[in-house]
Image (cartoon, helix red, strand yellow):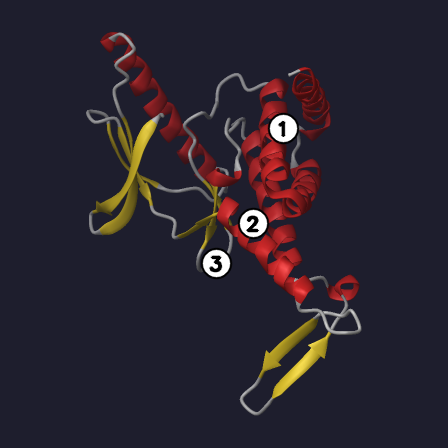
Amino acid sequence: AEARVFSTTFLGKPCVVKQRFKKKYRHPVLDEKLTRSRLLAECRSLMKARILGVQAPTVLFVDKSSASIFMERIEGKSLKEVLKSISKEEEEEKGSKTDDGLPTTTTTTTQSKTTVRTTAAASGSPAHHRAIKYGREIGLIVSKLHDGNITHGDLTTSNFLVHAKTDSVYIIDFGLSKTQIVGEEDVGVDLYVLERSLIAAHKSEGEKVWRECLKTWKETCRKSAEAFKRYEEVRARGRKRSMVG
């Protein structure tokens, strides 16, 4: 709805281009002003996020004439896809339990195969540990943004990428971000959108990620005390709306 996104190369390097197109339902002069303003705002947010130490795509080039941002291409999958695969892994782990009710892990060496049994309570499954890890990383990303006076505006699992090689989380798509006059309401809405995206779409995995994410955010964000109260207010309003319809 907002822009075209496609892969290409820039100076021989793989990149992603986000190109805002003209909205015919808007007056041409107004459309040009809004497009230019939002293009520059997104670039500012991306660059500021990088300065804050947030893992986000590097801006390589901005073409104002075509309203395009050329960004570093992050090789990996969306968090949405990864959490679905984790859910599948956990289902398979449950199905592969031994007769005594304990999951079996098989380790292969050059000489022989060794089967090791561990209880989930003792060590937890690899899928569970990955979900917890992603929750911590997301909580830290959001904390840095909020402390840096940035709200993302669209914290969904489609806007987090898991790097294919490092397995670390990156955040993308700052098209709805805000960097000026960011208040507690904006922070509260950011958190509520993230919570709904995780829990509504990913059930048990989403809840694990969200719990760890919120815990990390509260521990590291300087604005957490007042902002958390506002988040709870926003959450209460959201629940009320869903009940009334």
Q: Give the SS element for disc 1.
A: helix
The circle on residue 166 is 3
Residue at 54%, 26% in the rendered image? 149
- Mark 1 Cα within 10 Å, few/some/many (few <14, many 20+)? many
**Left of 60 or right of it: where is 55?**
right
The circle on residue 99 is none
**Pointer 1 with pointer 2, Cβ within 8 A:** no
Between 97 and 235, the residue placed more toward the observer is: 97
Q: Give the SS element for disc 3.
A: loop
Q: Quadrant of the N terminus?
A: top left
Residue at 20%, 48% in the rendered image? 11
Q: Nearer the viewer, mark 3 or mark 2?
A: 2
Indicate whether 155 appears above or below 107.
above
- Mark 3 Cα within 10 Å, few/some/many (few <14, many 20+)? few
Residue at 74%, 71% in the rendered image? 118
The circle on residue 83 is 2
